[in-house]
Structures are given as structure tokens and as C-alpha cells.
């Protein structure tokens, strides 16, 4: 697993001790600063008390992204055991932003979220309940899609047979560092299919995940969201299918 160089733009440690049930929220950031405060506010509103927060800016080209993040941290860092704003020295992609956050996290449990998504106040606490004292390496919930599109998500139990024909589980999930390490982290060359690759590696390693069939996470669809900007041509999609079939030969992608 490769590592990316980064700088610490902001850090405030309010509690040097790390409680057993501390969760680090790892938020990736690349431009789209207009959505960031709402995302961070939804994290701050979590009912689960022991929280750390790490935002990893992946060398945003819009300086306003870092400015907005720093302003929010200065106003709200007191809520967290440790609040950290990191910035990659050069753009590495969302997979590496996740990996940087996992490496920097103090806690065993890490909740992954992107800059434009939201979570309801019960989300992290409910996921901790689902994963605590079990053999699960991760836990995730059903999604509510909002913004440019309104609908229910398609999440279901993690199952190799269901994954064979395509991904149905978002990356917004509570993941243990042990499971993250066991699968080699997030793959940086998955070109928008990082989540799919991550869950494929879970089933290949025999790592289970808890599916919480409650609508606790919200996925925002907008013109800049990854699902609306990546793999826009049939040729690009075919290339990804070939790559993923070589990487995971059991897949039967259409």
C-alpha cells in the first residue's frame, strides 16, 4: 500500500485518551466546498459522543475548499476528541484520501464519508451497535439518494453472488482498521469504482460486514458527484470491466 505525503493544516486535540468506542470520521475533500459545511454539520450532530474527525483535502484546485474547511474547524473543533485537517501535497485520488485518513486515525473504527454526503444523527451510533463484539469488519446502512435525484438506495447484505454482476454497496460505511489492513486498503487505480473493488476484496478475504436496513445515510446526486462524472463513455466502462475481471476473475459484469 503506497503512502501520500501530506501537511497538517489544522489540528486540535481535546482529549489525548482514545476511548474503546471512539469512531474517527474520515471525510475526503476535493473542491465542492459549497456542500462541505452541511456534511460536517451532520457529523457534528451525531449522538455518538466519542468522535474524532479527519478531513483529507486531496490537493483541491479551488482554494475556497480549504478555506471553508479551516473556518469550520476553527468554529467547531471543540466537539471532537481530535480534529484534523490534512492536505495532500499533490492530487492522489479519493482512494488515497481514504487510506491517508485510516493511517492517521487513532481509533480502530473509522467511518468513511465524502464531502457532499450527509448522515442522520443516529447513524454512527447505530453502526457501532451493529459491529461491536462481532466478527464484522464493517457495517453500513441503506441510503437515501437526494439532490438531482430522489430515491431509495439499493444496498443489501454483502454477498459474493450479488456482487458478481455489479456493486450495490456505497463506500459510506463504518470500517475497522484491521479489515482495512487485511484487504490492503483502498485501491487507487480503480477509476471511480473504488467502493466496488473494496467490497470485492472483503468477500475474497472472507471478511463479513453488517448490513443495517435503516435509512441513516444520505447520498447527494449533483452534477459534480462521482457517479455523474465518471465512466461517461461505453469504451471507458468496457475498459473498467476488463480490468476488474482480471483483478477479480469471479465477477460476471454485463
Image (spheres, rainbow, N blue to C red):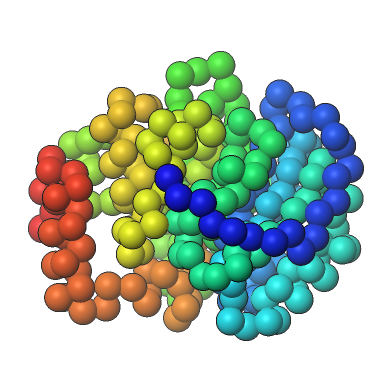
**Is residue 9 placed above or below 103 in the rendered structure?**
below
Rendering coords of residue 246 (x, y %): 14, 50
Rendering coords of residue 230 (x, y %): 33, 73
Would you identify the image quadrant in which residue 80 lies? Answer: top right
Q: Is residue 41 visible?
A: no
Question: Closest to the observer: 117 or 183?
Answer: 183
Would you identify the image quadrant in which residue 66 lies? Answer: bottom right
Rendering coords of residue 81 (x, y %): 82, 41
Residue at point 89% right, 42% down?
14
| Quadrant the C terminus occupies | bottom left
Residue at point 67% right, 33% down?
107
Would you identify the image quadrant in which residue 200 lies? Answer: top left
**Is residue 160 placed above or below 111 in the rendered structure?**
above
In the displayed structure image, the side of residue 199 where residue 246 appears, left or right? left
Residue at point 68% right, 82% down?
63
Q: How many marks?
A: 0
**Is residue 131 placed above or below 253 in the rendered structure?**
above
Amino acid at each position: 500500500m503506497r503512502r501520500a505525503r501530506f501537511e497538517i493544516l489544522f489540528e486540535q486535540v481535546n482529549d489525548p485518551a482514545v476511548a474503546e468506542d471512539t469512531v474517527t470520521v474520515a471525510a475526503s475533500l476535493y473542491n465542492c466546498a459549497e456542500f462541505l459545511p452541511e456534511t460536517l454539520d451532520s457529523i457534528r450532530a451525531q449522538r455518538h459522543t466519542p468522535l474524532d474527525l479527519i478531513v483529507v483535502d486531496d490537493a483541491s484546485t479551488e482554494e475556497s475548499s480549504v478555506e471553508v474547511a479551516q473556518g469550520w474547524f476553527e468554529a467547531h473543533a471543540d466537539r471532537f476528541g481530535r480534529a484534523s485537517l490534512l492536505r495532500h501535497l499533490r492530487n492522489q485520488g479519493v482512494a488515497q484520501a481514504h487510506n491517508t485518513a485510516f493511517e492517521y486515525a487513532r481509533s480502530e473504527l473509522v467511518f468513511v464519508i465524502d464531502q457532499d454526503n450527509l448522515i442522520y444523527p443516529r447513524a454512527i451510533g447505530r453502526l457501532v451497535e451493529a459491529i461491536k463484539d462481532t466478527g464484522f469488519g464493517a457495517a453500513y446502512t441503506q441510503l437515501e439518494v437526494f439532490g438531482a435525484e430522489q430515491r431509495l438506495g439499493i444496498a443489501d447484505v454483502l454477498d459474493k453472488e450479488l456482487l458478481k454482476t455489479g456493486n450495490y454497496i456505497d463506500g459510506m460505511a463504518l470500517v475497522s482498521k484491521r479489515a482495512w489492513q487485511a484487504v490492503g486498503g483502498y485501491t487507487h487505480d480503480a477509476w471511480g469504482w473504488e467502493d466496488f473493488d473494496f467490497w470485492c476484496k472483503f468477500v475474497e478475504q472472507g471478511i463479513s460486514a453488517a448490513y443495517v436496513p435503516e435509512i441513516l445515510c444520505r447520498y447527494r446526486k449533483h452534477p459534480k458527484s462521482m457517479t455523474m462524472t465518471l465512466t461517461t463513455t461505453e469504451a471507458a466502462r468496457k475498459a473498467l470491466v476488463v480490468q476488474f475481471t482480471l483483478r477479480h476473475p469471479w465477477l460476471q459484469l454485463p
